[in-house]
Amino acid sequence: MTQEPSLVRLRLSPMTAADLTFVESWLAEPHVARWYLESSTVTREIDQLRGCILGHEPTHAVTVRASDQPIGWCQWYRCDDYPDHAAGVGAQPDDIGIDYALGESAWVGRGVGTALIRTLVDHVRQRDPHAGVIADPNAANVASRRVLEKNRFTLLAERPVASEPTNAPMAIYRLDGQRDQLRRY
Ligand SMILES: CC(C)(COP(=O)(O)OP(=O)(O)OC[C@H]1O[C@@H](n2cnc3c(N)ncnc32)[C@H](O)[C@@H]1OP(=O)(O)O)[C@@H](O)C(=O)NCCC(=O)NCCS
C-alpha cells in the first residue's frame, strides 16, 4: 500500500544484481519506457546497470526504497568521467550528473519524485558537499522537469545534446554547488 508523500521516507542503497529484476519490470511500465526506451532497449539498460554494479563503469547505480519496498532507481556520476557528455551539457569541472525513475506506477504523480530529487541531491552531497548537480531530461518530459524546478535547479538551455542517444531537445538543468560561490570570489 502506498503512503502520503509527506509520510514517505525514501532510502537509497547501492543497486545489487538482484535488484535488476525490478528494473527490468519497471522498464516495461509505459511511463518509464516512454523516456528510457525511446532510443535504447531493455537489454542495453540492464547491461549498463550491471556494468555499474560490477564496478566496470564509474557510475553509481542506486535502488530507491520506500518502507523497504523497492520503487525505483537512480544513477549518479562525475561528469568529468564522461568528457563527451560533460562537454555536451556544458558541465562545470567536478559537476555530478543524475538520472532517476520511479518504476512503480502507483508511486508516480504523488509528489514522491520531488522528494526523490531532494534525497538524491542529499545523497550526492554527503559524498561531495561542494558539487554542482546537473540533469538533462528530454525537454518534453514535463514531470521530470518539474521535479528539478521544484528542487531549485536552474534551466541552462534547451537543445539537443550530442552525447545523448536521441536528437530530441533536452532541458539542461543545474543546481549550483558551493564551488560556484568560491569561483565567483
Ligand atoms: C519524473 C518522475 C521522477 C517525477 O516524479 P513524480 O512523483 O511523478 O512527480 P511529482 O508527483 O513529484 O510531480 C512533480 C510535478 O510534475 C508534475 N507532473 C507529474 N506528472 C506529470 C505528467 N505526467 N505530466 C505533466 N506534469 C506532471 C506535477 O503536477 C508536479 O508539478 P506541480 O507541483 O507544478 O503540479 C516520475 O514521473 C518518473 O519516474 N517518470 C518515469 C521516468 C522518468 O521520466 N525519469 C526521468 C528521466 S530524465
Image (spheres, helix red, strand yellow):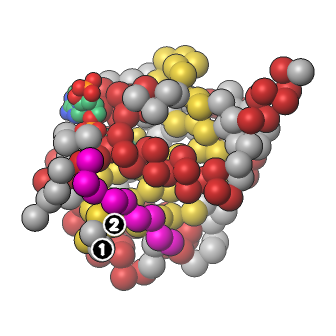
Q: Which residues are magenta?
A: 6-14
Q: Can residue 143 be seen at all in this image of the molecule?
A: yes
Magenta-drawn stretch contains 9: yes
Q: Is residue 177 above or below residue 82?
A: above
The residue closer to the viewer here, 97 or 50, is 97
Image check: 135 left or right of 101?
right
Instruction: Name the residue rendered at 64%, 50% in the picture.
Output: 125
Q: Examine the image and state in which quarter residue 3 appears.
A: bottom left
Q: Is residue 179 above or below residue 107?
A: above
Image check: 149 left or right of 124?
left
The residue closer to the viewer here, 161 or 62, is 62
Q: Residues within 10 Å of mark 1 (few under 14, many from 20)?
A: few
Give the residue number, with chain letter if any, for mark 2: 65
Give the residue number, with chain letter if any, for mark 1: 68
> Residue 168: image x %, image y %?
41, 26
Instruction: Name the residue rendered at 55%, 51% in the picture.
Output: 122
Magenta-drawn stretch contains 153: no
Asked if labels 2 and 1 touch by Cβ distance under 8 angstroms, the answer is yes
Residue at the bottom extreme of this rendering: 18
Q: Give SS at disc 1.
A: loop
Q: On the rendered image, what quadrant is the C terminus found in?
A: top right
Q: Is residue 68 above or below residue 143?
A: below
Image check: 40 left or right of 7?
right
